[in-house]
Amino acid sequence: MTEPQTPRTPLEQIFFGQARVSRTMGSPFSAAVLEVMLADLQAGGVFAEVLEPFAGLDLNGQIDAATPIRPLGWAHFMALGGEASALSALYPPNVTEADPDALAAVLIPLARARQAELSAFIASPPQTNEVRRTLCLFGGFATVAAETGLPLRCLEIGASAGLNLNWPKFRYRFGEAGAWGDPQSPVGIDGDWRGPPPPLGPITVTETRGCDIAPVDIRDPLQARRLRAYVWADQRDRVARVDGAIALARQTGLDLVQADAADWVEAHVRPTPGVATVLYHSVMWQYMPAATQERITAHMARMAGLATPDAPLAWLAMEMIPGEVLMEVTLRLWPNGGQRRLARVHSHGASVDWAPGT
């Protein structure tokens, strides 16, 4: 294949940068696929055409839109299906290393032949629903439970397929520090946890429910396949976790609805006597319009004024740190109020630097 050139535009820069990030995050195969796309983009090929709607974004806009993840997900989606067997043969688990020339020879003509489908696929934001992110979110839930002494009522926005609504049914392992959850759970969550463990006492959860602007129905094989497609193909542990979480969700069911996040928060998030109400989200805040963010923030400020020790309110978030690769977990717990950073974390949840109050 033609090697990518030095990136000039923000669109080229984000593909180049994402390829580097993918390698540092243990996915050289995804990096190779992105470089194939970048070379075609720079040559004015099919990827230049389908990505034209994103060409006017500055670099921050490209980051917020997660532009490279969109066609990367489409390529994996095609490889996971039976309609592109030549591409499937070049993808894990059928191979252990990428062959850039072979990928270019198959992927570029496939994108041209299915250009309309590709354009439709990348029009929607990625929905990774990364299950391992519950490792750091669990620390937040455990902190709220320990500090309030109350059962939890957990409400998630941007829930995607709702897989993380089942966080109380996962098994969490913190190395020598201990574990929490059902040892027989089909979803095991661990990672490089640095720092003291979170409170590992009993947690009672009375309710888990969520919303998404475009929820993924994992009962639909095509929608479940799309969800799996955003998991990087050469990271088999992530693939196994999402498969286990999909199976668990199909078995237990989920309370997940289609709704605008601000509408849903205003309708459902308020202090409730006898439970700690927790609004939570992970890697979704950047995708919402500023007006939606402002409505949610204003509503939480109003509800914070109603919180009491018997009806506390918490806001738990795992979101980007501007200008950094790592993300942060923050917690606000009212009536005491005040935001604190609980941890700095890998975007897929693979590592957690747990340092409450920093």
Image (spheres, helix red, strand yellow):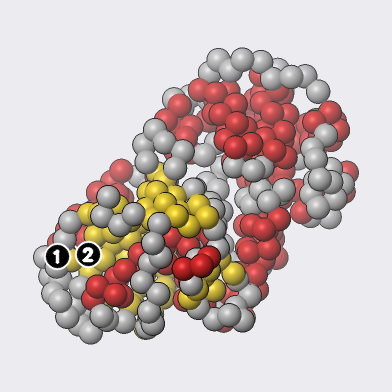
**Cβ–Cβ under 8 Å for marks 2 and 1:** yes
Instruction: Answer left or right for 312 relative to 206.
Output: left
Rendered-image quadrant of the N terminus: top right
Disc count in the image?
2
Residue 303 locus on image (x, y percent): 17, 66
Residue 131 locus on image (x, y percent): 54, 62
Residue 290 locus on image (x, y percent): 30, 43
> Circle 1: is it few (<14), some (14-19), or many (20+) Cα within 10 Å?
few
Residue sitting at x 13%, y 74%: 308
Snapshot quadrant of residue 87: top right
Task: Classify 288 as above or below 256.
Answer: above
Q: Which mark is residue 357?
A: none
Residue sitting at x 71%, y 55%: 236
- Tag 1 residue: 336
Residue 71 locus on image (x, y percent): 64, 39
Task: Classify 280 as above or below 55.
Answer: below
Between residue 151 and residue 48, name the one nearer to us.
151
The secondary structure type at the circle numbered 2 is strand
Instruction: Answer left or right for 323 relative to 179.
Output: left
> Circle 2: is it few (<14), some (14-19), or many (20+) Cα within 10 Å?
many
Between residue 328 and residue 74, name the one nearer to us.
328
- Tag 2 residue: 333
Task: Indicate the amino acid at tag 1.
Answer: Asn
Task: Indicate the amino acid at tag 2.
Answer: Leu
Q: What is the CA distance from the residue labelled 2 to the residue labelled 1?
A: 6 Å
The secondary structure type at the circle numbered 1 is loop
Q: Is residue 262 visible?
A: no
Residue sitting at x 71%, y 49%: 233
Q: Is residue 314 visible?
A: yes
